[in-house]
Amino acid sequence: MTDNVSLPIGTWRGVSFAVAQIDVLRAAEDLLVVGMLEKDVAGAHRGGAEAIDHALHGTLSRLREGGIFTGGFGETLMLTRPPAPIRAATLMLIGMGASLTGDPEVVGALTGLAMQAALRIGAASVGCLLGWSELDLPAPLVAPSAAAMMRGALAAIDAQEQQAASIAWTFDIRNGAAAHTTTALREALAAWR
Amino acid sequence: MLTRVSSGRVPARGTTPIRILLVDDHMLLREGVRAVVSTQDDMEIVGEAGGGAEAIREFARLQPDLVLMDLQMADMSGLDAITAIRAATPNARIIVLTTYSGDGRAIKALRAGAMGYLLKASLRNQLLEAIRSVHHGGKHLDASVATAIALHVLDEDLTEREVSVLTLAAWGNSNKQIAARLALSEETVKGHMKALFAKLGASDRTHAVTIAAKRGLIEL
């Protein structure tokens, strides 16, 4: 479940994309994808990841601090059956490395990882909260980052041999650039066709 | 024309089934897991073992992509088997499938190299998700176990000596008897007990034993 404002992007091989600010406590998605850095950066946004960590009384932070999940780039940890108040069926943590580089291709690679996981587990609904979408990105980086996210997702879909089951995929956007991001995502999808 | 596969899941191009070694000393459990896996196009059970030592031999012989490992087995614990397999094959992918939800065994298993930790009470789909996630290099935990781990992963570990002392206490030994068995002074045993109470947040020795057993820090 997402906030009221959900902007549709389009569909590719059974996957319907949208943009919205996801309420991580209300979201009853099959899969919630959350990006985590190796260490929190002072003053930086943690957005959805922080909300989930708070709801789970610091579980995510302590797993990272204890070395169970380090946050290294591309590392993944699936948590099935998260406790209340989280309503999503599965949480997927994705390591984003030491820092947010702002490199669009890095965003794309991690989005691809998330899509691969969604396809593997047969998720019907996915909320994707990667850190970049929460940043106050410089305007020139918004469109390239959004396009890279879409390309990463589409490449993962196309790597599958057969038609994916129907997936409702929502990119979480909370940096105030939803309209700009939506346009870039739509253009990237159109260019992929 | 694109079509759905029978399992409802979409294999990536050019993939072969995930070859799984199943390790559990209960045949009924093995039969159940085999039945679940056999419904999937992208995975297969290539071997079974009823104990830790056999698991190590079968892993070396079959070189499976992934191992489903019980922890409590008669001849050798799953933890020791994980350690041995990972020592020989550092990139071996192992998922623990156990009845134990306590953090102690889970932390030990993950630190020994297990990449997944699931409870036998897990749903069928959770097992299949875990197999696929771990095969692709990810980690997979039951969230209730993750929560238990998170509560204690930053705690100071019990030392081997403290575990020995508490295990003997659990079997009804007095401090004097524990001291005699471990060739320590009674004062030293009292010191270990005091440290145990502090680490476990226990009010007395019975409380300490209860906490440690529940968390899987001692074997009874």
Image (cartoon, coloured by chain):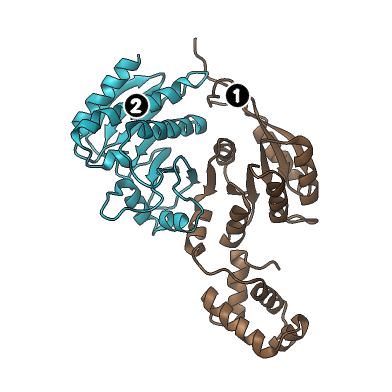
Q: Is residue B128 left or right of residue A94?
A: right
Count neighbours of disc 2 (C-alpha within 10 A) and say few if under 14, some if 14 to 19, many if 20 or more: many
Horizontal and vertical percent position of residue A133: 28, 38
- Residue A65, numbered label: none
Q: Residue at x 69, y 66 (%)?
A: B219
Q: Which residue is mark 1?
A: B15
Three-letter code for the amino acid on which mark 1 is drawn: Thr
- Residue A154 can be seen, yes or no: yes
Label 1 to label 2: alpha-carbon separation: 24 Å
Q: Quadrant of the C terminus of chain B?
A: bottom right
Q: Residue at x 47, y 22 (%)?
A: A164
Q: How many marks?
A: 2
**B219 is higher (above) or lower (below) than B59:** below
Q: Nearer the viewer, residue B79 or B141?
A: B79
Q: Nearer the viewer, residue A29 or A79?
A: A79
Q: Quadrant of residue B131?
A: top right
- Residue A150, numbered label: 2
Q: Residue at x 69, y 79 (%)?
A: B169
Horizontal and vertical percent position of residue A157: 44, 23
Q: Is residue B146 left or right of residue A188?
A: right
* Subunit under mark 1: B
**B178 is higher (above) or lower (below) than B142:** below
Q: Nearer the viewer, residue A156 or A172?
A: A156
Kind of element beneath mark 1: loop
Q: Are marks 1 and 2 in contact (CB under 8 Å)?
A: no
Horizontal and vertical percent position of residue A18: 30, 29
* Subunit under mark 2: A
Please name the color used to draw chain A. Answer: cyan
Kind of element beneath mark 2: helix
Q: Chain drawn brown, letter?
A: B
